[in-house]
Amino acid sequence: MKIPQRKDEHIYHTMGSDVTCKTPAGFDDVTLVHSALPEISYADIDTSVELFGKRIDAPLMISALTGGSELTGKINKSLAKLAHAYNVPISVGSQRAMHAESSLRPTYEIRSYAPDVLLFSNVGIAQLITMSDDEVEHMVSSIGADVLAVHLNPLQEALQPEGDTNFSGGIGRLREIKDALSIPVIVKETGAGISYEAASRISFLDGIDVAGVGGTSFAAVEYHRTTDEMRKNIARSFWDWGVPTVASIVECIEVFDTLIASGGVRTGIDIAKSVALGATCAGIAQPFLSAVYKRPHDEARHYVETLIEELRITMFLVGAASINDLRNAPVVVGGTTRDYLFERGFSVEYLARKGDIR
């Protein structure tokens, strides 16, 4: 199958089929402690934060989505304009297509639409293993990216017919490319989360995007793509495979100071909870795709403004005038997420006692 066709199929199924994880991200198990006496002015609340040396206006990122076809190029253009309008970071989708076919590079070239935003380049670890340092440098520089995100997607690669399943030597290659590039290098999952053990093995990197279970399931996407009954059954079995987002945040924040929370983040309250758990910012993908896919640009703007307003109200209700204050706000983790983390050996009591003055 040609690359543009595969990229378009991913979009069509993400938009037209049920591809949402059945296992929740865990945000319903997280409660921010309400402050009846916030002692701040709502008008003074500052949602800005620094990420990889750039000041962004909110702890929000338009996560990696697409590229590699005419349709996806238009989507990337719309998303770039959105990122520019609100000064939030954006990542292109996997540049595997561009590396394989140079004619597809324009579908990733969005810098002219977002000249000042924090832009993430994106390549899979299976592809990184086979690329030279010069090829990676060219891939990053050709789109004017500020950060390289290497996506970890063993589940997706194992399920898709076109998958690259040789991950041998991936950690060593990550160390090499970190040393070779002059920009930050991070890793991100693609919907299956990252455990403490995996994070610990790559602690030499500049950051991590957990991309946990709770949002779009790429096993579900592959389920809808295939017509082979056996492959469908296998993809169905792995629909919810992985570490839920909230649990992944708690595990990985012990390793990385710079952490992006993604996977089932849908509201400004989810963003606030992510920050209170330790994340630097939160990434959202599918809702942004939905907002720009065959719909007016105004809907995407409305969604961003709603997210930021929900975040501001949440900050007001916990007495946080800044993102740093929000990071120090107490948060209670209960339910299935607490049970999961307890069994994994992670305590969450300290999260509930942050800022304790008793």
Image (cartoon, rainbow, N blue to C red):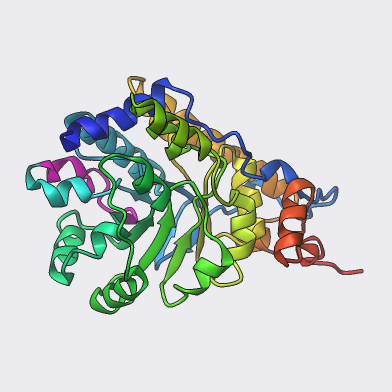
Residue at figure coordinates x 77%, y 53% from the top left: 339
Q: Is residue 305 left or right of residue 179?
A: right
Asked whether residue 112 is in view, the answer is no
User: Among all residues in the image, which is located at the extreme left?
Assistant: 103
Q: Is residue 246 left or right of residue 55?
A: right
Q: Is residue 299 above or below residue 28?
A: above
Residue 32's spot in the image, x, y percent?
75, 50
Q: Which residues are magenta?
A: 104-119
For residue 138, what is the image quadrant? Answer: bottom left
Q: Is residue 207 above or below residue 236?
A: below
Asked whether residue 1 is in view, the answer is yes
Residue 223's spot in the image, x, y percent?
41, 30
User: Among all residues in the image, which is located at the extreme right?
Assistant: 358
For residue 266, what is the image quadrant? Answer: top right
Q: Is residue 56 above or below residue 196?
A: above
Residue 5 versus residue 184: which sits nearer the camera? 5
Where is the C terminus found, in terms of image quarters? bottom right
How many labels were placed on the picture?
A: 0
Residue 214's spot in the image, x, y percent?
57, 41
Q: Based on the picture, tell me whether residue 166 belongs to the magenta stretch.
A: no
Where is the N terminus found, in terms of image quarters? top left
For residue 148, what is the image quadrant? Answer: bottom left
Residue 164's spot in the image, x, y percent?
27, 52
Q: Is residue 143 left or right of residue 15?
A: left
Residue at figure coordinates x 61%, y 71% from the top left: 254
Residue at figure coordinates x 30%, y 59% from the top left: 166
